[in-house]
Amino acid sequence: MGTDADRTWIIERAKGLGFDLCGVVRAERFPELRQFEEWLERGYAGEMKYLEDPRRANPELVMQDLRNVIVCALNYNTAHPYSTEAAASATTQGSLQGWMSRYAWGDDYHEVMWGKLNALAEALKEKFPEPFTTRAYADTGPVAERVFAKYAGLGWLGKNTLLLNEKHGSWLFLGVIFTSLDLPPSLGPAEGPPADLCGNCRQCLDACPTDALIEPYVLDARRCISYLTIELRSSIPEEFREAIGWHVYGCDICQDVCPYNCQAPVTTLEKFQPRQKDNEKSLIRPSLEWLAAMGQAEFRETFRNSAVKRTKWAGLVRNACVAIGNVGGGAGGPDRARILELLKGLKESKVTTIAESADWALRRIQQTHE
């Protein structure tokens, strides 16, 4: 069995590779993993069938001879206003802008995390001579990273269901290395995971526009703006469209209002800084007209090595139409005429979700001016 010094070496090596937090935990079926099956049975996963993979609830099925999980966290917070602050500014300016989730502004976090995790796995092979296996996941496999992070001592699971760290808040990408290495865990036998410091606060629940946090610590993904704008392939249900507001890819609201994110540190990692070719094609408050008019070739070029590609071209244009319907009512003069013509063209799209969303947006804007 490895020693405490071995574990310390791993944690320090992870931080040397740029990770902000690292911990080691036994690969056990923790209570949250057992509760996951009930969450699925309630239908809260919506169309995310990949979550039904039995390995997600039972880590022993992921890898033979699995003993430990090394959990790493990487800060992606950048020095730009939160969506709740930026929304007020956009409304005042009356411009047709949308919002993309903070984690999608820079390079694809899967690739960034994957590179660092593989580098750590290679360092393990150099450090430990005995034969062992590793398998790294960066939000790419049947793994509940947040649960392992909690029991590795990295934080607690907040009422918004995300991992919260008292110092770093929740702006954290999580990655894991499953390994057959026998290592002492970060938390000793007498230690429990970090205390839940959410207390009586319910700002995340109260701020969610679609009431996706149906109770503390329980998310109905079918109502979540991130699910609706990224994972859902069909049309967005009309009951949620107005509440989606200007969001075109993901949502940060439950994190933006969290008190632990008020003073969250800012990353210096260049790969997570916003891609900003020019003001019109910035991913921070992007032009909705630009996104709605974007063709498939431009989509592939713009979002190469970007997490945004997950929503696919049709999904992004669909989302842009809905956002225009929500914020386009204030457009006047040539802007309004141009937007109406764009929507009329999209209404004729052969892609049903785009055509239907454009029609909805047209009706919304026309009703505003009646």
Image (cartoon, rainbow, N blue to C red):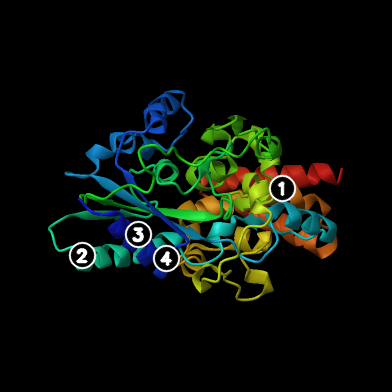
Local crowd at mark 4 within 10 Å, few (<14), some, or many (≥20)? Answer: some
**Residue 17 in view here:** no
User: Where residue 18 sits in the image (x, y, percent)?
Assistant: 44, 68
Circles 2 and 1 in contact, beta carbons < 8 Å? no
- How far separated are the C-alphas under marks 2 and 1? 54 Å
Q: Earlier in the sequence, mark 1 or mark 4?
A: 4
Residue mark closest to the camera, 3 vs 1: 3
Task: Assign the C terminus to one quadrant of the image.
Answer: top right
User: Where residue 12 sits in the image (x, y, percent)?
Assistant: 38, 64
Residue that mark 1 sits on? 325
Above or below, comparing residue 84 to residue 210 in the picture? below
Q: Earlier in the sequence, mark 3 or mark 1?
A: 3
- How far separated are the C-alphas under marks 2 and 4? 17 Å
Q: Return the residue nearer the eye: 254 or 354.
A: 254
- How far separated are the C-alphas under marks 3 and 1? 53 Å
Residue type, label 2: Lys
Residue mark closest to the camera, 2 vs 1: 2
Residue type, label 3: Thr
Residue mark closest to the camera, 3 vs 2: 3
Q: Return the residue nearer the eye: 229 or 16.
A: 16
Name the residue located 69 percent from the left edge and 54 percent from the top edge. Answer: 262
